[in-house]
Image (cartoon, grey):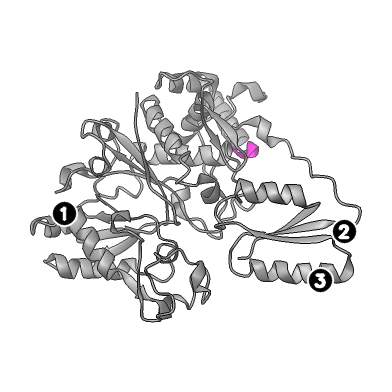
């Protein structure tokens, strides 16, 4: 065997070793050699032993060095480290409830959304196929976050991660907003950050559900389709409230914006129209007909079977950003019953 | 190639791998105060109430303490946990689902 052949065989053995240790997501990982981890550590000014997070359910310490090891395994580049660190910091926010998300029977897993100048500089994709394969930053950063949650948090499938199904986002679930194609201010600006800042938003999310509307050319009929995709009986939002996400494709966003609709108008319309009556909701959901346990606003009369329950408790809980390429599609991404958290990326 | 662990930087916190020790088991339920902690999902309370009834038939429990979490997806409050710890000799938790 040639020297190169022997070296590649050694790499293969290291890859197998990582499988044997239970460090992977089922796919091969890049072996986290000392040299590779040191190169990854050069992507951040934080010290290797600094603890960024205590990751539930096992409360493992996510030191910068362990984060770098998982980032190497995921296929990241050193410049991705600040994004991963910011995402971890956001996941530690109590309103995200990572402990619950790590162990739940529900499909939810963190969705990572990148905004600001760094999104483009680091190659995050927000256009065509942005939720799919093909883009290293999206794939590797999303994967690094998931590997950290499994390896350092200890939430392994069937052991402490009790997800009935999981969903493919548990391999990687990371996108950028398509800020160039958005007719509105960037999502992170709507959350109070400066346009010159770059941010990461994390959200415990189902897989995206497509909203196919090729026929509408006005906001009302378009959003009618959106509302009737959002008000599903099977998602958590209509029983537990908190945030949910709408991702408008650029063509749908244009239909809304050219008539002067802003985020607040869209939220108002959907808050009014994305509803279901109690007589339907009590068939299933979290508590069936034990209605007092649902986390509905107190102004919902639980004794009125015709009362219309909104999919969120407050209209501002409908989070909106623009992504994707050409095509008359948008996405509804239901949540688990917790909040989207946004953090600034610091280099 | 013989692989040694020090060839790679571990991506896990090895200290979490150690098994936690179980608390000592009670030798009897007679004369004991038993807590019943409902996670507040559907039917958790049903299971626990029935269990408390059946245990009370078989044992002389000194006290039965029912408590519930505010919401199933979060830990029980410190107040609930403190009360159970101070009043009860053992606790049974139900994950109604």
- Identify the element where label 2 is drawn: loop
Residue in the picture at 31% in, 62% down? A210
Between residues B33 and B28, which one lies in front from this camera angle?
Answer: B33
Asked if marks 2 and 3 fall on the same chain, the answer is yes
Badges 1 and 2: C-beta atoms under 8 Å apart? no
Chain ID, mark 1: A
Please state the horizontal and vertical placement of residue A188, each as a whole percent of the image.
27, 41
> Residue A260 falls in which quadrant of the image?
bottom left
Q: Is residue A173 left or right of residue A30?
A: left
Residue in the picture at 54% in, 50% down? A100
Q: Which residue is mark 1?
A: A262
Asked if marks 1 and 2 fall on the same chain, the answer is no
- Quarter that holds the N terminus of chain B: top right
Q: Which residue is mark 3?
A: B54
Alpha-carbon span between mark 1 and mark 2: 63 Å
- Identify the element where label 1 is drawn: loop
- Identify the element where label 3 is drawn: helix
Q: Identify the disc placed on residue B29.
A: 2
Alpha-carbon span between mark 1 and mark 3: 60 Å
Tell whether position B77 is magenta. no
Please state the horizontal and vertical placement of residue A216, each as a whole percent of the image.
15, 68
Above or below for A182 versus A267: above
Front of the two marks 1 and 3: 3
Alpha-carbon span between mark 2 and mark 3: 12 Å
Front of the two marks 1 and 2: 2
Between residues A47 and A266, which one lies in front from this camera angle?
Answer: A266
Range covered by the magenta-colored residues: A19-24
């Amino acid at each position: 065997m040639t020297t190169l052949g022997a070296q590649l065989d050694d790499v293969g053995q290291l890859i197998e070793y990582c499988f044997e240790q239970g460090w992977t997501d089922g796919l091969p990982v890049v072996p986290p050699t000392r040299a590779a981890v040191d190169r990854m550590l050069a992507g951040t000014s934080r010290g290797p032993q600094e603890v960024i997070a205590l990751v539930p359910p096992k409360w493992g310490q996510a030191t910068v060095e362990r984060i770098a090891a998982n980032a190497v395994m995921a296929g990241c580049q050193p410049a991705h480290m600040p994004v991963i660190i910011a995402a971890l910091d956001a996941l530690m926010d109590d309103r995200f409830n990572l402990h619950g998300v790590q162990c739940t029977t529900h499909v939810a897993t963190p969705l990572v959304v990148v905004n600001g100048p760094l999104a483009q500089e680091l190659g995050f994709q927000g256009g065509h196929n942005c939720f799919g394969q093909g883009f290293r930053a999206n794939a590797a950063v999303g994967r690094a976050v998931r590997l950290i949650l499994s390896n350092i948090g200890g939430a392994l499938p069937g052991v402490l991660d009790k997800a009935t199904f999981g969903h493919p986002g548990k391999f990687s679930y990371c996108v950028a907003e398509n800020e160039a194609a958005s007719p509105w201010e960037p999502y992170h600006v709507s959350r109070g950050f400066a346009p010159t800042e770059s941010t990461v938003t994390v959200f415990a999310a189902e897989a995206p559900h497509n909203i196919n509307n090729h026929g509408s050319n006005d906001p009302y009929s378009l959003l009618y389709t959106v509302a009737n995709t959002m008000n599903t009986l099977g998602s958590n939002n209509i029983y537990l409230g908190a945030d949910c996400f709408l991702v408008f494709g650029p063509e749908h966003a244009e239909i809304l914006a050219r008539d002067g609709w802003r985020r607040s108008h869209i939220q108002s319309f959907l808050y009014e129209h994305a509803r279901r009556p109690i007589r339907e909701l009590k068939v299933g959901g979290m508590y069936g007909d034990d209605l007092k346990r649902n986390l509905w606003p107190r102004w919902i009369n639980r004794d009125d079977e015709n009362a219309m329950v909104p999919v969120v408790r407050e209209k501002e809980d409908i989070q909106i950003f623009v992504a994707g390429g050409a095509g008359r599609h948008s996405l509804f991404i239901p949540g688990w019953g917790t909040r989207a958290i946004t953090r600034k990326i610091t280099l | 190639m013989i692989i040694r662990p020090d060839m790679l930087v571990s991506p896990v916190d090895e200290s979490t791998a150690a098994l936690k020790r179980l608390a000592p088991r009670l030798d009897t339920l007679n004369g004991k105060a038993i807590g019943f902690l409902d996670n507040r999902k559907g039917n958790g309370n049903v299971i626990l109430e029935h269990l408390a009834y059946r245990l009370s038939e078989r044992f002389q429990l000194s006290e039965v303490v029912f408590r519930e979490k505010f919401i199933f997806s979060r830990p029980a409050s410190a107040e609930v946990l403190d009360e159970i710890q101070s009043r009860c000799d053992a606790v049974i938790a139900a994950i109604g689902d």
